Image (cartoon, rainbow, N blue to C red):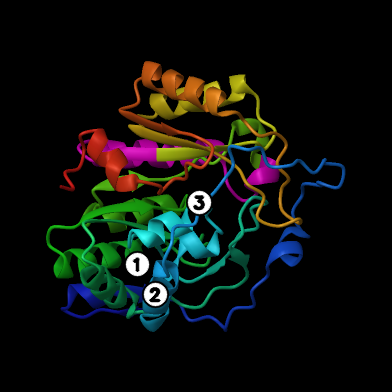
Amino acid sequence: MTDRVTSDPIKTIPLTVVDAPAKELGEDKIARNRANFADAPALRKPSWIRVRIPPGNAVAKLKAKLRENRLVTVCEEASCPNIHECFGKGTATFMVLGEVCTRRCSFCDVAHGRPQAPDPLEPAHLAGTIRDMELKYVVITSVDRDDLRDGGAAHFAACIRAVRFENPSIRIEILTPDFRGKGRMERALEALAGDPPDVFNHNLETVRALYREVRPGADYDWSLDLLARFKAQHPQIPTKSGIMLGLGETFGQVEEALNDLRSHAVDMVTIGQYLQPTAHHHPVIRYWTPEEFGTLEELGYRLGFQHVASGPLVRSSYHADQMAHAAGFVNVA
Protein backbone atom coordinates (compact mmCIF):
# COMPACT_ATOMS: atom_id res chain seq x y z
CA MET A 1 0.00 0.00 0.00
CA THR A 2 1.16 3.52 -0.82
CA ASP A 3 0.08 6.52 1.24
CA ARG A 4 -0.22 10.01 -0.13
CA VAL A 5 -0.34 12.51 2.73
CA THR A 6 -0.32 16.29 2.44
CA SER A 7 -1.30 19.17 4.69
CA ASP A 8 -4.43 19.69 2.59
CA PRO A 9 -7.38 17.87 4.23
CA ILE A 10 -8.84 17.28 0.77
CA LYS A 11 -5.97 15.08 -0.44
CA THR A 12 -5.16 12.70 2.41
CA ILE A 13 -6.09 9.25 1.05
CA PRO A 14 -4.52 5.78 1.28
CA LEU A 15 -3.87 4.33 -2.17
CA THR A 16 -3.65 0.73 -3.32
CA VAL A 17 -2.10 0.06 -6.72
CA VAL A 18 -3.99 -2.52 -8.78
CA ASP A 19 -4.48 -3.28 -12.46
CA ALA A 20 -7.28 -1.75 -14.53
CA PRO A 21 -10.64 -3.31 -13.65
CA ALA A 22 -12.50 -5.86 -15.71
CA LYS A 23 -16.20 -5.24 -15.14
CA GLU A 24 -18.71 -8.08 -14.94
CA LEU A 25 -22.37 -7.23 -15.35
CA GLY A 26 -25.66 -9.13 -15.47
CA GLU A 27 -25.22 -12.79 -16.37
CA ASP A 28 -21.42 -12.72 -16.03
CA LYS A 29 -21.65 -11.25 -12.53
CA ILE A 30 -24.39 -13.57 -11.24
CA ALA A 31 -23.09 -16.78 -12.88
CA ARG A 32 -20.89 -17.66 -9.89
CA ASN A 33 -23.51 -16.81 -7.28
CA ARG A 34 -24.59 -19.79 -5.16
CA ALA A 35 -28.31 -19.19 -5.63
CA ASN A 36 -30.25 -20.74 -8.52
CA PHE A 37 -33.24 -18.82 -9.84
CA ALA A 38 -34.12 -21.00 -12.85
CA ASP A 39 -37.52 -22.11 -11.50
CA ALA A 40 -38.70 -18.71 -10.26
CA PRO A 41 -41.86 -17.37 -11.96
CA ALA A 42 -41.79 -14.06 -13.81
CA LEU A 43 -44.20 -11.69 -12.07
CA ARG A 44 -45.88 -8.69 -13.66
CA LYS A 45 -45.35 -5.38 -11.95
CA PRO A 46 -48.46 -4.26 -10.08
CA SER A 47 -50.15 -0.94 -10.70
CA TRP A 48 -48.50 0.73 -7.68
CA ILE A 49 -44.99 0.22 -9.10
CA ARG A 50 -44.98 3.26 -11.31
CA VAL A 51 -42.25 5.82 -11.84
CA ARG A 52 -43.27 9.23 -13.12
CA ILE A 53 -40.69 10.91 -15.32
CA PRO A 54 -40.77 14.69 -14.76
CA PRO A 55 -40.55 17.07 -17.72
CA GLY A 56 -37.30 18.73 -18.79
CA ASN A 57 -33.78 17.42 -19.25
CA ALA A 58 -32.43 17.81 -15.73
CA VAL A 59 -31.21 14.21 -15.73
CA ALA A 60 -29.06 14.72 -18.82
CA LYS A 61 -27.65 17.99 -17.45
CA LEU A 62 -26.72 16.52 -14.08
CA LYS A 63 -25.19 13.44 -15.69
CA ALA A 64 -23.03 15.71 -17.84
CA LYS A 65 -21.82 17.59 -14.75
CA LEU A 66 -21.02 14.32 -12.98
CA ARG A 67 -19.02 12.98 -15.94
CA GLU A 68 -17.17 16.29 -16.24
CA ASN A 69 -15.99 15.85 -12.64
CA ARG A 70 -15.36 12.10 -12.99
CA LEU A 71 -18.01 11.29 -10.40
CA VAL A 72 -20.37 8.32 -10.18
CA THR A 73 -23.79 8.11 -8.54
CA VAL A 74 -25.38 5.01 -7.12
CA CYS A 75 -28.59 6.37 -8.63
CA GLU A 76 -27.23 5.41 -12.06
CA GLU A 77 -25.11 2.37 -11.22
CA ALA A 78 -27.83 0.64 -9.18
CA SER A 79 -30.65 1.55 -11.63
CA CYS A 80 -32.66 3.35 -8.92
CA PRO A 81 -36.32 3.89 -9.90
CA ASN A 82 -36.28 7.38 -8.34
CA ILE A 83 -33.44 8.74 -10.45
CA HIS A 84 -35.61 11.12 -12.47
CA GLU A 85 -37.27 12.60 -9.40
CA CYS A 86 -34.01 13.08 -7.50
CA PHE A 87 -31.96 14.29 -10.47
CA GLY A 88 -34.84 16.57 -11.41
CA LYS A 89 -34.47 18.25 -7.98
CA GLY A 90 -30.69 18.49 -8.41
CA THR A 91 -29.91 15.89 -5.75
CA ALA A 92 -27.95 12.66 -5.95
CA THR A 93 -26.27 9.99 -3.87
CA PHE A 94 -22.61 10.02 -4.78
CA MET A 95 -20.74 6.73 -5.09
CA VAL A 96 -17.05 7.01 -4.33
CA LEU A 97 -14.22 4.49 -4.68
CA GLY A 98 -15.12 3.58 -8.24
CA GLU A 99 -17.92 1.72 -9.95
CA VAL A 100 -16.58 -1.83 -9.64
CA CYS A 101 -17.53 -3.91 -6.58
CA THR A 102 -15.56 -6.81 -5.13
CA ARG A 103 -18.72 -8.81 -4.36
CA ARG A 104 -21.47 -10.55 -6.36
CA CYS A 105 -24.70 -9.78 -4.52
CA SER A 106 -27.60 -11.26 -6.46
CA PHE A 107 -29.86 -8.20 -6.07
CA CYS A 108 -27.38 -5.51 -7.09
CA ASP A 109 -26.81 -4.04 -10.57
CA VAL A 110 -23.38 -2.56 -9.79
CA ALA A 111 -20.56 -4.23 -11.76
CA HIS A 112 -18.28 -6.83 -10.15
CA GLY A 113 -14.54 -7.08 -10.72
CA ARG A 114 -11.16 -5.91 -9.49
CA PRO A 115 -11.33 -2.17 -8.77
CA GLN A 116 -8.73 0.47 -9.47
CA ALA A 117 -6.91 2.29 -6.70
CA PRO A 118 -8.87 5.10 -5.01
CA ASP A 119 -8.68 8.34 -6.97
CA PRO A 120 -6.75 10.86 -4.83
CA LEU A 121 -8.57 13.74 -6.54
CA GLU A 122 -12.05 12.34 -5.99
CA PRO A 123 -12.69 14.10 -2.65
CA ALA A 124 -11.83 17.47 -4.20
CA HIS A 125 -14.00 16.79 -7.28
CA LEU A 126 -16.85 15.69 -5.05
CA ALA A 127 -16.58 18.75 -2.81
CA GLY A 128 -16.48 21.12 -5.77
CA THR A 129 -19.49 19.53 -7.45
CA ILE A 130 -21.54 19.68 -4.25
CA ARG A 131 -20.56 23.34 -3.87
CA ASP A 132 -21.58 24.11 -7.46
CA MET A 133 -24.91 22.30 -6.97
CA GLU A 134 -25.50 24.29 -3.74
CA LEU A 135 -26.60 21.19 -1.88
CA LYS A 136 -27.51 21.34 1.81
CA TYR A 137 -27.59 17.57 2.41
CA VAL A 138 -25.62 14.90 0.64
CA VAL A 139 -25.35 11.12 0.81
CA ILE A 140 -21.99 9.49 0.06
CA THR A 141 -21.84 5.74 -0.54
CA SER A 142 -19.45 3.27 -2.12
CA VAL A 143 -19.03 -0.17 -3.58
CA ASP A 144 -17.58 -2.92 -1.41
CA ARG A 145 -13.78 -2.62 -1.39
CA ASP A 146 -12.51 -5.88 0.09
CA ASP A 147 -9.16 -5.15 -1.60
CA LEU A 148 -8.47 -2.30 0.86
CA ARG A 149 -7.29 -2.95 4.42
CA ASP A 150 -9.87 -0.54 5.86
CA GLY A 151 -12.58 -1.23 3.27
CA GLY A 152 -12.25 2.34 1.99
CA ALA A 153 -13.11 4.06 5.28
CA ALA A 154 -10.16 6.47 5.10
CA HIS A 155 -11.39 7.56 1.68
CA PHE A 156 -14.84 8.20 3.17
CA ALA A 157 -13.18 10.32 5.85
CA ALA A 158 -11.20 12.25 3.23
CA CYS A 159 -14.42 12.92 1.31
CA ILE A 160 -16.15 14.14 4.48
CA ARG A 161 -13.24 16.50 5.23
CA ALA A 162 -13.16 17.82 1.69
CA VAL A 163 -16.90 18.35 1.41
CA ARG A 164 -17.07 20.19 4.75
CA PHE A 165 -14.03 22.30 3.83
CA GLU A 166 -15.78 23.55 0.67
CA ASN A 167 -19.32 23.51 2.11
CA PRO A 168 -19.19 24.49 5.82
CA SER A 169 -22.96 24.27 6.39
CA ILE A 170 -23.44 20.92 4.61
CA ARG A 171 -24.99 17.89 6.31
CA ILE A 172 -23.43 14.57 5.31
CA GLU A 173 -24.87 11.08 5.45
CA ILE A 174 -22.64 8.14 4.57
CA LEU A 175 -24.00 4.79 3.40
CA THR A 176 -21.14 2.39 3.97
CA PRO A 177 -20.26 -1.21 3.11
CA ASP A 178 -19.91 -3.64 6.01
CA PHE A 179 -16.10 -3.40 6.36
CA ARG A 180 -16.04 -7.16 6.86
CA GLY A 181 -12.71 -8.94 7.30
CA LYS A 182 -10.00 -9.48 9.86
CA GLY A 183 -9.26 -6.17 11.54
CA ARG A 184 -11.13 -4.22 8.85
CA MET A 185 -14.00 -2.97 11.01
CA GLU A 186 -11.56 -1.75 13.68
CA ARG A 187 -9.51 0.13 11.07
CA ALA A 188 -12.67 1.54 9.50
CA LEU A 189 -14.10 2.83 12.77
CA GLU A 190 -10.73 4.34 13.65
CA ALA A 191 -10.55 6.08 10.26
CA LEU A 192 -14.02 7.60 10.75
CA ALA A 193 -13.51 8.55 14.40
CA GLY A 194 -12.01 11.95 13.67
CA ASP A 195 -14.30 12.84 10.76
CA PRO A 196 -17.69 11.27 11.47
CA PRO A 197 -20.74 12.01 9.31
CA ASP A 198 -23.97 13.62 10.47
CA VAL A 199 -25.82 10.34 9.79
CA PHE A 200 -24.28 6.85 9.63
CA ASN A 201 -26.15 4.45 7.34
CA HIS A 202 -25.43 0.79 6.65
CA ASN A 203 -28.06 -1.42 5.03
CA LEU A 204 -28.97 -4.79 6.47
CA GLU A 205 -30.61 -5.37 3.03
CA THR A 206 -32.57 -8.53 3.82
CA VAL A 207 -33.59 -11.00 6.54
CA ARG A 208 -31.19 -13.42 8.18
CA ALA A 209 -32.47 -16.54 6.36
CA LEU A 210 -31.78 -15.10 2.88
CA TYR A 211 -28.24 -13.86 3.38
CA ARG A 212 -26.44 -16.73 1.63
CA GLU A 213 -28.32 -16.26 -1.63
CA VAL A 214 -28.91 -12.49 -1.53
CA ARG A 215 -25.72 -11.14 0.10
CA PRO A 216 -22.89 -13.65 -0.39
CA GLY A 217 -19.72 -12.43 1.28
CA ALA A 218 -21.70 -10.55 3.93
CA ASP A 219 -22.86 -11.60 7.39
CA TYR A 220 -26.11 -10.59 9.08
CA ASP A 221 -24.65 -10.30 12.58
CA TRP A 222 -21.54 -8.49 11.32
CA SER A 223 -23.71 -5.76 9.81
CA LEU A 224 -25.68 -5.40 13.03
CA ASP A 225 -22.42 -5.22 14.99
CA LEU A 226 -21.07 -2.47 12.73
CA LEU A 227 -24.16 -0.34 13.36
CA ALA A 228 -23.99 -0.93 17.10
CA ARG A 229 -20.27 -0.26 17.39
CA PHE A 230 -20.48 3.00 15.46
CA LYS A 231 -23.36 4.11 17.70
CA ALA A 232 -21.39 3.21 20.82
CA GLN A 233 -18.46 5.25 19.52
CA HIS A 234 -20.67 8.20 18.50
CA PRO A 235 -23.84 8.09 20.62
CA GLN A 236 -24.91 11.55 19.46
CA ILE A 237 -24.90 10.60 15.76
CA PRO A 238 -28.05 8.91 14.37
CA THR A 239 -27.73 5.51 12.73
CA LYS A 240 -29.85 4.24 9.89
CA SER A 241 -30.41 1.00 7.98
CA GLY A 242 -32.63 -0.39 5.25
CA ILE A 243 -34.15 -3.64 4.02
CA MET A 244 -35.70 -4.79 0.75
CA LEU A 245 -38.88 -6.83 0.44
CA GLY A 246 -39.88 -9.30 -2.25
CA LEU A 247 -36.93 -11.70 -2.13
CA GLY A 248 -38.83 -14.50 -0.42
CA GLU A 249 -38.98 -13.26 3.16
CA THR A 250 -41.97 -13.68 5.47
CA PHE A 251 -43.62 -11.02 7.59
CA GLY A 252 -42.27 -12.69 10.71
CA GLN A 253 -38.72 -12.58 9.35
CA VAL A 254 -39.08 -8.88 8.53
CA GLU A 255 -40.38 -8.24 12.04
CA GLU A 256 -37.37 -10.11 13.42
CA ALA A 257 -34.99 -7.97 11.35
CA LEU A 258 -36.63 -4.76 12.56
CA ASN A 259 -36.37 -5.97 16.15
CA ASP A 260 -32.69 -6.79 15.60
CA LEU A 261 -32.02 -3.30 14.23
CA ARG A 262 -33.69 -1.63 17.19
CA SER A 263 -31.83 -3.85 19.67
CA HIS A 264 -28.61 -2.61 18.03
CA ALA A 265 -29.59 1.05 18.61
CA VAL A 266 -30.52 1.90 15.01
CA ASP A 267 -32.56 5.12 14.93
CA MET A 268 -34.04 5.20 11.41
CA VAL A 269 -35.05 2.55 8.90
CA THR A 270 -36.12 2.39 5.26
CA ILE A 271 -38.23 -0.45 3.85
CA GLY A 272 -38.75 -0.75 0.09
CA GLN A 273 -39.75 -3.17 -2.64
CA TYR A 274 -36.96 -5.04 -4.43
CA LEU A 275 -37.08 -4.60 -8.22
CA GLN A 276 -35.13 -7.03 -10.39
CA PRO A 277 -32.54 -5.02 -12.41
CA THR A 278 -31.98 -7.66 -15.13
CA ALA A 279 -33.28 -11.11 -16.02
CA HIS A 280 -30.11 -12.62 -14.53
CA HIS A 281 -30.52 -11.15 -11.06
CA HIS A 282 -32.51 -12.47 -8.13
CA PRO A 283 -36.18 -12.60 -9.21
CA VAL A 284 -38.98 -10.80 -7.43
CA ILE A 285 -40.72 -13.53 -5.45
CA ARG A 286 -43.57 -11.28 -4.33
CA TYR A 287 -44.72 -7.70 -4.61
CA TRP A 288 -45.69 -6.42 -1.18
CA THR A 289 -48.77 -4.18 -1.20
CA PRO A 290 -48.86 -0.54 -0.11
CA GLU A 291 -51.09 -1.63 2.78
CA GLU A 292 -48.43 -4.10 3.96
CA PHE A 293 -45.78 -1.40 3.78
CA GLY A 294 -48.08 0.76 5.89
CA THR A 295 -48.39 -2.01 8.47
CA LEU A 296 -44.60 -2.28 8.64
CA GLU A 297 -44.33 1.49 9.09
CA GLU A 298 -46.66 1.30 12.08
CA LEU A 299 -44.68 -1.64 13.45
CA GLY A 300 -41.42 0.28 13.10
CA TYR A 301 -42.73 3.20 15.13
CA ARG A 302 -44.07 0.85 17.80
CA LEU A 303 -40.61 -0.70 18.06
CA GLY A 304 -39.14 2.73 18.75
CA PHE A 305 -37.56 3.91 15.48
CA GLN A 306 -37.37 7.69 15.32
CA HIS A 307 -38.34 7.64 11.64
CA VAL A 308 -39.62 4.91 9.33
CA ALA A 309 -39.86 5.28 5.54
CA SER A 310 -41.82 2.30 4.22
CA GLY A 311 -43.23 2.05 0.70
CA PRO A 312 -42.83 0.26 -2.65
CA LEU A 313 -40.42 2.81 -4.14
CA VAL A 314 -38.60 3.77 -0.94
CA ARG A 315 -34.83 3.43 -1.20
CA SER A 316 -32.11 3.93 1.37
CA SER A 317 -31.19 7.43 0.17
CA TYR A 318 -34.63 8.51 -1.03
CA HIS A 319 -35.59 11.80 0.66
CA ALA A 320 -32.71 11.20 3.08
CA ASP A 321 -32.59 14.87 4.01
CA GLN A 322 -36.31 15.01 4.79
CA MET A 323 -36.07 11.80 6.80
CA ALA A 324 -33.24 13.05 9.01
CA HIS A 325 -34.95 16.40 9.46
CA ALA A 326 -38.33 14.83 10.31
CA ALA A 327 -36.67 12.65 12.92
CA GLY A 328 -35.24 15.78 14.51
CA PHE A 329 -31.61 14.80 13.95
CA VAL A 330 -30.48 17.22 11.25
CA ASN A 331 -31.56 20.76 10.44
CA VAL A 332 -31.46 21.19 6.66
CA ALA A 333 -33.59 24.31 6.43
Left or right placement of residue 82 versus residue 229 in this view: right
**Magenta residue span:** 212-240
Q: Is residue 36 above or below residue 16?
A: above
Q: Which mark is residue 155?
A: 1
Report helix, strand or loop for mark 2. helix
Q: Which mark is residue 52?
A: 3
Residue 191 falls in image quadrant: bottom left
Res 12 visible: no
Q: Is residue 229 magenta?
A: yes
Gap between marks 3 and 2 measured at Cα? 18 Å
- The nearer-to-camera label among 3 and 1 is 3
Residue 303: x and y, percent? 39, 18
As shown in the figure, which amino acid type bears the numbered disc 1? His
Report helix, strand or loop for mark 1. helix
Q: Is residue 132 magenta?
A: no
- Whichever of callouts 3 and 2 sits on the residue coming sooner in the sequence is 3
Q: Is residue 285 above or below residue 306?
A: below
Report helix, strand or loop for mark 3. loop
The residue beneath circle 2 is: 61
Left or right placement of residue 52 versus residue 328 in this view: right
